[in-house]
Amino acid sequence: MLALLATGNGAGYDYVVELDMSPESLETALEELFFAWNPPNPRVKVAGCAGEREGSSLRRFLYLNGVPYIWDDRTKHQELTVHVDDVPILHPTPSQLYVALGIIPAPSHPSSYPYDLVVVGGGPAGLSAALSASLVGLSTLVIEAHRPGGTATTSINLIRNYLGFPGGVAGTRLAKLALEQMATLDIDWRPSYSACSLRETKGGRYEIQVGKHPDDVVSAGMVLLACGQKPNRLALGEAQQTEEYFLNRGVYYGAVPSDRLVEVGKDVVIVGGGDSAGQAALLFAKGGSESIAIVARDGLTMAKPLREEIYDHVPTLINVFRAKVTEFSGTEQLAAVGVRGKWYDFPIPATSAYINIGGKPNTEWLRGSGIELDDGYIKTDIYLETRARRREALPFETSLPGVFAAGDVRVKSRRRVGQAVGQGTAAVASMERYVQDKPRVLADPGSTAHLLLDILDVVDSAARRGLKQWLQRPPS
């Protein structure tokens, strides 16, 4: 067993990771140490309280995007300020940080540009589709309101089902590699946009509402819906407002490795009984949390090896089975989680609660658009009610012509990164077939894809003229 030590970070304590020498253990531990390390001269320096709602969101943003930083928590009574290359940004938004840090290049076109393709969602399916679309000449815009890489970047588990990484790959690393690859291509990003509605316009094109103002729209010849899933909320009834109030004030959805740095010596509640909940329990136990409680409505459903590892390595574990959370309580920060079972009803003292109860497709904004849904998941190709269509759907095409879907949001999805990447690429192959039949949806005559179609049309016309002349030639 090898122990690695990082000292002198801003929290005032040393940070130790024990690991075996397997590649996946080494990679994950080194990544965690990197974010515990106090770099000598990072680009980002933060002043303000790390525990407040805004500070907690910022800490997660910096971790998920692989940005080393120094956080001066001695200034906790100051307004939250981020210095990027010594330039201060007061209360920064994610879009401001994306641009300031150069994580996403500034867009090449104005927001009114008639894009060939708009990709809604920057997860593995969306990134794969944007990459493939750019390579075939489609002018492409990616809308991602939260983080490039999607939910894969927040996983505390290694992604073990992706080709080319025999020891697994951390979601943050995979997303970072993808963004580095895409930075060299002509792909626009709008990280401040959030899709609100979809409607068809004249000429077979589409408009996506991305804000409250009527003019906050983007124009698309085709659309790829790769909007993924969002975490399930707890059904707390009249106490639902307590969940909203303590969001990022002690209540979080999912856990990332950097979270264990702020949970040392604290009491943590984990809601859920699946693999994600189990991995979170191990994460906090190895990080030195004071006590850990798992609240599971239906008992532990995680894999048996993981369950056994928890019992072996989490001595302070408290299991609360066949129970549900009733409320969260505290003043400015979370102090307790109310739990109720058949024979008990009591509060569990906790400074943090991590909710891991699955997710649902992020498709509420599509209702009324004409997209066929099945329990929120998008129907495509063979799953469509084909009688309502004018023609047979292309692979990955939805009930709206020229609108495609890929990844976790698609009906019958298996929620695998490798599958999402493959679907994104395959959807672009269907788009190429679509624009050959409907070239007018490519509104910009200067786009590479439009020029290629013009060349094909010229070649096709010349071939037809040659055939006609050959058929009309006089007999010899």
Image (tube, grey):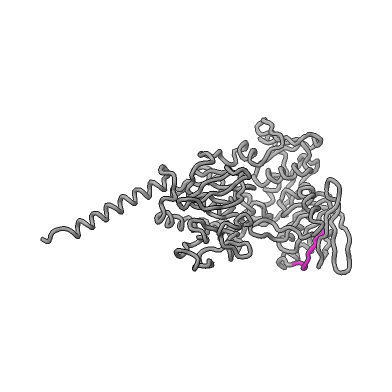
Name the side, left or right, on which 332 lies relative to 192: right
Magenta region includes residue 294: yes
Work out whether 277 lies above or below 81. Answer: below
Q: Quadrant of the N terminus?
A: bottom right
- Please name whichever residue, 386 or 396, is drawn nearer the observer in this view of the structure: 386
* Location of residue 429 in the rendering, given as x and y in whole percent from the top left corner: 45, 57
Q: Residue at x 56, y 59 (%)?
A: 371
- Please name whichever residue, 174 or 344, is drawn nearer the observer in this view of the structure: 344
Q: Quadrant of the C terminus?
A: bottom left
Name the side, left or right, on which 431 lies relative to 332: left
* Location of residue 165 in the rendering, given as x and y in whole percent from the top left corner: 58, 56
Q: Which residues are magenta?
A: 292-300
* Location of residue 320 in the rendering, given as x and y in whole percent from the top left corner: 83, 64
- Please name whichever residue, 209 or 87, is drawn nearer the observer in this view of the structure: 209
Residue 353 at least partly seen = yes
Magenta region includes residue 239: no
Name the side, left or right, on which 455 lies relative to 474: right
* Location of residue 398 in the rendering, given as x and y in whole percent from the top left corner: 52, 60
Q: Residue at x 76, y 66 (%)?
A: 300
Name the side, left or right, on which 387 lies relative to 245: left
Q: Residue at x 38, y 46 (%)?
A: 451
